[in-house]
Image (cartoon, rainbow, N blue to C red):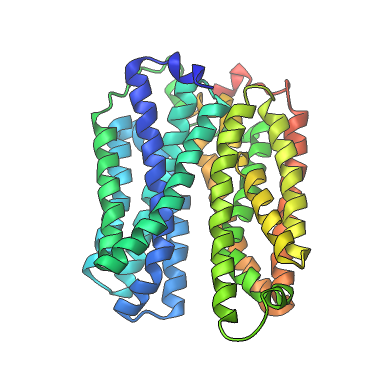
Amino acid sequence: MMSVFRRLKTQQQHLLYACFFAFFCNGALSMTLGSALPDLRAAYHLDEAVSGLMLSAHSGGNLAAGLLSGLAPLYLGEKRSILLLSALGFLGFLMMLVWGNPVWLIMAFLLTGMGRGSVTNFSNRKVNALTLGSPAASNMLHASFAVGALVTPLAFLALRRALSWQAGVGFVMVALLFSLFFMGTRPMEEKERKQDKRQDKSLVFLKNKAFLILGGMMFFYLCSEYSINGWLVTYIQSKTSLVESLGSGEGLQQRLSDYSQMMATLFWVLMLVGRLGSAALSAKIHQKTLMMLASFSTVVFFALMLFGSSIAQVTFAVAGLGLSMAGIAPMTYSDAAIFTNRYPLATGVLLAFGSAGAVLMPSLVGIMTKSLGMLGGMSLILGAIVLLAVFAVLNRLMLGKTAIPEEAVA
């Protein structure tokens, strides 16, 4: 696995590490929004409708960044575009601290989404280009996100208790400033492209079946991940069988709350472990095969979590779910390197596929829950995971068949 890094020049290694730190900051940014939302609501007297619009604005900004961050380098250059776009995340957090107007805050969340999506696009594309699509490097990149997602809620809570919630937000802002500094001081080779400039703006890869299959995988994967992150705690707290397992009497609700939060943390801990494990396994097993096996495993563990009736079953299922899902997104980006290294817009479009699922599915789960109950709503996620497995099989069948015709540029 380390051979991927050793064969790079020193400057390339430094740029790779800057991408890893930027992804750490993306994980920090993502989790801080959820951690700070209750304090924002209390400080600025926001209702549930405004809070929902704020979160939707973040997802919308993340979606818009897919294409924006693909086009910006064509006009501003690579370094200036990533510095400008990633700075939007810092600006969004700054706006949260200075004014509580609902429209202002919705704009702030929109900017954090645009900054996050731009970093996701740039870092995935750059790591793929530097390492020639190494699945190990891609898994390491996404493991950095998991580290940020794990560390930041703890840092936010500690700073909130010691100082204020504003100090917790300030922690992420400082990390984002360091990320901007690291990116700004790394040399980026702005090479002249040999191909026709029309290829820079081309969407011809959308005609390629292999790319569309990867887009389908990304859509259903992020449908699942975002819905699980958003609804896991609520679902666990609604399970009558778990309430009975935790006993009765005083403090029952607190024990249930603590257990559900522990499961959310366990999920991300195992996501981190799984991404490191996928990085190692990808050196021995083809990533298309790994993604297919991981997708099947995800179906099994989510079903066990959904229908498990004891604490032992649910805990085991959540742990298995984190391990199974961990490497799917990184390897999807890595598998798409044949497209993303050739067409600048391909990474952004792949991100847009996933972001569309991230925006759509959590809302659908909420709608289904109102009419069919929590089990009915969560079953919708199971359907998305089954479709993820179907696309993973189709992707495995494409092994050795992926090709980009030269005349596609014309």
Camera-nearest residue between 344 and 233: 233
Residue 128 visible:
yes
Q: Is residue 124 above or below residue 162?
A: above
Q: In the rendered image, which quarter contains the N terminus?
A: top right
- Residue 210: x percent and y percent? 68, 31
The residue lying at 40 percent from left, 47 percent from top is 26
Q: Position of residue 292 (x, y in %)?
A: 73, 37
Q: Nearer the viewer, residue 104 or 98?
A: 98
Q: Residue at 53% of width from left, 57% of height from top?
A: 265
Horizontal side of 99 relative to 332 (left or right) equals left
Quadrant where the C terminus lies? top right
- Left or right side of 326 for 241: right
> Looking at the picture, how far across and down is residue 217, in whole percent?
66, 43
Residue 57 in the figure: left or right of residue 298: left
Is any part of residue 113 visible from this angle?
Answer: no
Q: Front-most of 168 and 142?
A: 168
